[in-house]
Amino acid sequence: MLPCYACQHSDAERKNKGFFRWKGENLPPLYEKDPSHIDLLEQYNIPFIFDIHTHFFPEYIMRLIWKWFDKVQWDIAYRFSTEKRLEELKKNRVSYFTSLNYAHRPNMAEMLNLWVYENCLQIPGMLAFGTFYPENGVLRYTKKAVEEYGLKGFKLHCEVSKLNLNLPELHSVFLYLEEKQIPLVIHTGTAPLKGEFTGISYFAPFMQTFPRLKVIVAHMGAAEIEEYANLFAIYPNLYMDTTMVFVDFLATGESVDEVFFLLEKYSERIFFGSDFPNIPYSYSHAVKSILEKNISKKTAQEIFYKNAIKFFTIREFV
């Protein structure tokens, strides 16, 4: 298991392998048995974390995803069974999280939606998300996921899926989701890898076509974070998540500290996200990379749980 990797390999070995750079000389722990961020949460009066960006797939697909990460020397801190991963989230004081997944080929998305319906709806704290893909029947099975399965949103990954958001085949789906106000988490940015259809040049016209669509831009749109943030003034239903942006692992860019001010400026439009379990550092590092910087208590509370509670109308708090 990967926690053992942290015991057997030095920081230098972790730092010098792989395609992505690290900031500084001392790497964060790959895994923490006792999370080191709990005291920080208490200092900021954050009772729990609402993590908008966590991944759950059928086990055989998750193993294939991990195999891809292995090929690019991207360590997986939480390479555990689903049951163990749920325990880790609870231990890290994560009370709410999402079942984000995505399809990279036809005839996959509908299967994933059914898997979410059959496996995720009864998990405490999990918000069930599905996905879709430009293919025959996409509007039909998207409606089914909402109206029959009760899924709360959808995830799209423009780089992995080689997905152009402006495809005519998806127009009716986006119109439906816009009408129903069902949110989308979209990996549309150019980091960590640029895709054929990633970036603001594809996303901006998409939002022009569907201006009322509820969209959460994953990874704050890295590596064009300010360009995406400029769209806040135009689209009231546009949001971002902080996934992997301010950590020492520089997959989302090497100058992200320059945009930390956006957390205060747009505190009501930004959610915390982690990319759990597929992160090459402990969960605490993702939390501390924000809370150990110059951030107000109000903004920290909004980003780590209040915004998402309001966005998803969690009944216990409304």
Image: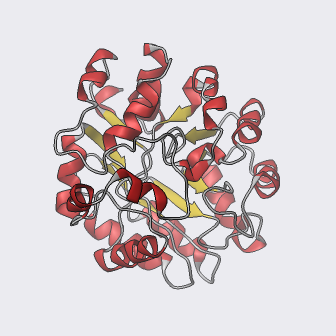
Q: Nearer the viewer, residue 213 or 70?
A: 70
Residue 11 at what x, y percent from top left? 36, 51
Query: Looking at the image, which residue is at 46% across and 24% down?
Result: 302
Q: Quadrant of residue 94?
A: top left
Q: What is the number of callouts on the image?
A: 0
Looking at the image, residue 195 sits to the left or right of residue 61; the answer is right
Residue 171 visible in rendering? yes
Q: Quadrant of residue 310?
A: top left
Looking at the image, residue 298 sits to the left or right of residue 250; the answer is left
Against 127, is 34 above or below? above
Q: Nearer the viewer, residue 175 or 108?
A: 108
Query: Looking at the image, which residue is at 44% across and 70% down?
Result: 69
Q: Quadrant of residue 314?
A: top left
Quadrant in which the N terminus appears: bottom left
Q: Nearer the viewer, residue 137 or 67?
A: 67
Residue 183 at what x, y percent from top left? 55, 49
Quadrant in which the C terminus appears: top left
Residue 279 visible in rendering? no
Q: Nearer the viewer, residue 291 or 27?
A: 27
Query: Looking at the image, which residue is at 76% across and 34% down?
Result: 230
Residue 281 at what x, y percent from top left? 36, 49
Looking at the image, residue 194 sits to the left or right of residue 73; the answer is right
Residue 62 at what x, y percent from top left? 35, 72
Against 71, is 56 above or below? above
Query: Looking at the image, which residue is at 35% across and 47% down?
Result: 97
